[in-house]
Image (cartoon, grey):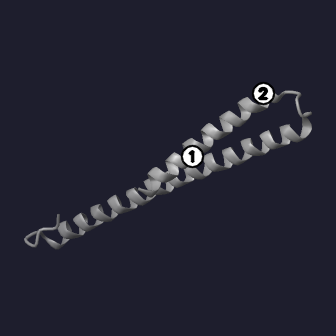
Amino acid sequence: MIDSASTPAEREIEALRARVAQLEAIDAERRRIEHDLARGIEFERLLSAVSQGFLRSGAEAGAEAHAQQIDLALERLAAFAGSRRALAC
């Protein structure tokens, strides 16, 4: 905290420390957003792979494997949505 009795140099140092703290908080938020974005891209790729798998497979062939892929995709979507909600809070 800046004290009015401090020297100009001390006030400047305190102001710089406060600015560094602000920039560190901004950088941490940027890293969280990048992480969430990467997870979203990963989910989109997984969902696309599942969709392509359905298109390539017959109606019954590999249905269990595809159901597991869908379950995994839904779990990742729920995790991603949860992280987005937490970020919004």
**Which residue, given by chain and number where applicable, does mark 2 sit on?**
65
Label 2 neighbourhood size at 10 Å, few (<14), some (14-19), many (20+)? few
58 relative to 41 in the view: left or right: right
- Residue furthest to the front: 60
Tally the numbered discs.
2
Placement of 11 over or under 33, stated as above or below: below
Which quadrant holds the N terminus? bottom left
Going 79% across and 41% down the picture, which residue do you hit? 49
Residue 81 in the image: state x and y as whole percent. 55, 49
User: How far separated are the C-alphas under marks 2 and 1?
Assistant: 22 Å
**Which residue, given by chain and number where applicable, does mark 1 sit on?**
80
Query: Of label 2 and label 1, which has the lower sequence position?
Result: 2
Observer-nearest residue: 15 or 66?
A: 66
Residue 76 in the image: state x and y as whole percent. 61, 40
Disc 2 secondary structure class: helix
Going 46% across and 54% down the picture, which residue do you hit? 87
Going 51% across and 46% down the picture, which residue do you hit? 82
Amino acid on which disc 2 is placed:
Ala
51 relative to 68 in the view: left or right: right
Observer-nearest residue: 30 or 16?
A: 30
Q: Quadrant of residue 68?
A: top right
Disc 1 secondary structure class: helix
Placement of 72 over or under 44, stated as above or below: above
Placement of 73 over or under 68, stated as above or below: below
Task: Please state which of the two labelled residues, at mark 2 or mark 1, is closer to the viewer.
Answer: 2
